[in-house]
Image (tube, grey):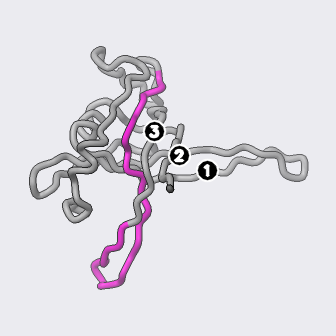
Amino acid sequence: MSVNKVILVGRLGADPEIRYTLEGKPVAVFRIATNEVFVKNGEKETITEWHRLVAFGRLAEICGEYLSKGTRVYVEGKLRTRKFEDKQGQTRFVTEIWVQNLQILDRKGETLQREPIKEELKKEEVFDLDEEISAIDEEDIPF
């Protein structure tokens, strides 16, 4: 038995980018930052890690509608590494977190941009799209 599960709490570094597969299914790509604070030689230091996240289907649409730069989110997902060729023909790899569950942790209007979150979306509402993620093949992703 094996487990591939990622849990992150962080803030978006930019607004999500929404793209569409050839079949017209929405895909949201965004990055979040997580911070680790520790003491080294008596000095407080912070390490920031950036994580690339990908959401599919209805969850991608929700990300595009309700998330913006600075929004604090709780994310559950799984790691995926994709191989692709860049414009120069070089083989590249990218590791992403495919989002399965998402909770918005900010209270209404509390993001860094001070943009209000729409009333229909309740704080800590959970979105589960296991079915939609499994229905999309890696070949369908347009990037």
Query: Which amino acid type is shown beneath numbered disc 2?
Result: Ala
* The C terminus: image quadrant: bottom left
In the image: residue 52, left or right of residue 24: right
Residue 55 sits in which quadrant?
top left
Find residue 99 and report its image quarter. Answer: top left
Foreground disc of the pair 3, 1: 3
Q: Residue visible at 11% across and 58% down? A: 22
Mark in front: 2 vs 3 = 3
Q: What residue would you read off at disc 3?
A: 75
Alpha carbon distance from label 3 to label 1: 17 Å
Residue at the extreme bottom: 89
Answer above or below: position of 67 versus 38: above
| Label 3 packing within 10 angstroms: few (<14), some (14-19), many (20+) | many
Q: Determine the secondary structure under disc 3.
A: strand
Residue 89, x across and y down, in percent: 30, 85
Are the residues at dot 2 and dot 3 in contact (C-beta closer than 8 Å)?
no
Magenta highlight on residue 93: yes
Residue at 83% in and 46% down:
39
Amino acid type, residue under disc 1 in the picture: Thr
Q: Which mark is residue 48?
A: 1
Q: Is residue 5 above or below residue 113?
A: below
Main structural element of the magenta stretch: helix, strand or loop? strand
Tell me the element at label 1: strand
Residue 33: numbered disc? 2
Mark 1 to mark 2: distance in Å? 6 Å
Q: Residue type at mark 3: give it.
A: Val
Residue sitting at 26 percent across and 62 percent down? 138
Q: Are marks 1 and 2 in contact (CB under 8 Å)?
A: yes
Horizontal and vertical percent position of residue 132? 23, 44
Residue range of the region highlighted in magenta in the rendering = 82-106
The residue lying toward the viewer, choosing from 53 and 132, is 132
Left or right: residue 34 compared with residue 63: right
